[in-house]
Amino acid sequence: MSPADASPAPTDSDADGVPNIAVRLPRDRATAAAARRLLRTRLGPVVPEETLDDALIVVSELVSNAVVHGSGEIELRIAFDGTRLTGDVADEGRGFVRPQGDRAPDPADANGLYLVERIASAWGVHDGCAQVWFEIPGRRLS
C-alpha cells in the first residue's frame, strides 16, 4: 500500500467546521510526507501558519518514528479546538522499549524527539502501547 492509499477513518468537524483528522497510514518511507500534505490541506485554512508549521514538524517526526521503530498500521489523530491543536500517533507495536545494559543512547535517534520537546507545549507516551500524544498552542484564523 502506498501513502496515497491512506485510509481515512471517520473524520468529524466541530460546530464551526474545523476538521478533526483520524486516518490510518501505511508503513512506508513516504508516509510522513503524506501526513504533512494531509495536515496542510485540512488545517491550512483554519490555523495560523506558525501553528501549522509546528504541527508539521511534530507529526512528521512522530510518524517517521512509527514507520522506523513501530510495527503494523499507523494511526494519526488530530483535533483543533480554536486554542490548541492536540493529536497522537499510534502503531501496533509494543511501545517504547528501553535499551538493556549500559549502552548509551544514540544521539541521532533522539534528535527528532528533541524537536517535539521544544515545539509541543506538552507531549508524552502512553504506557504499554505505541502511542505518543502532543499538544500545540494555536488560535483560529479570523
Image (cartoon, helix red, strand yellow):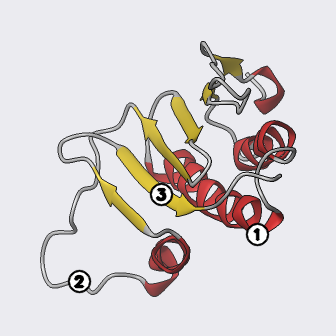
Q: CA distance from mark 2 to mark 3?
A: 31 Å
Task: Write the residue at 50% across / 45% down.
Answer: 87
**SS for dot 2:** loop
Between residue 81 and residue 96, name the one nearer to us: 81
Q: Which label's residue is closer to the chain start, 1 or 3?
A: 1
The x and y percentages for residue 24 are 60, 25
Task: Give the CA distance from mark 2 to mark 1.
Answer: 38 Å
* Percent position of residue 32, x then y: 70, 49
Marked residue nearer the N-terminal end (2 or 1): 1
Q: Nearer the viewer, mark 2 or mark 1?
A: 1
User: How far separated are the C-alphas under marks 1 and 3?
Assistant: 14 Å
Question: Dividing the picture into quarters, in which one does residue 19 lie?
Answer: top right
Q: Nearer the viewer, residue 58 or 43?
A: 43
* Image x and y of residue 51, in percent: 70, 63
Which residue is disc 3 drawn over? 135
In the image, taking residue 92 as reference, residue 47 lies left or right, namely right
Residue lying at 62% horizontally and 47% vertically, measured from the top left: 82
Q: Provide residue 126's location: percent of width, then percent of height.
A: 25, 47
In the rendered structure, the answer to whether residue 104 lies left or right of residue 127 reads right
Q: Callout 2: 10 Å neighbours few (<14), some, many (20+)? A: few
Residue under the image location 54 percent in, 55 percent down? 62
Q: Nearer the viewer, residue 90 or 50?
A: 50
Amino acid identity at mark 2: Arg
Q: Quadrant of residue 6?
A: top right
Residue lying furthest top:
10
**Mark 1 = which residue?**
50
> Is 17 left, or right, of 109 in this rendering?
right
Q: Name the kind of residue labelled 1 in the image.
A: Glu
**Which residue does the numbered mark 2 point to in the structure image?**
103
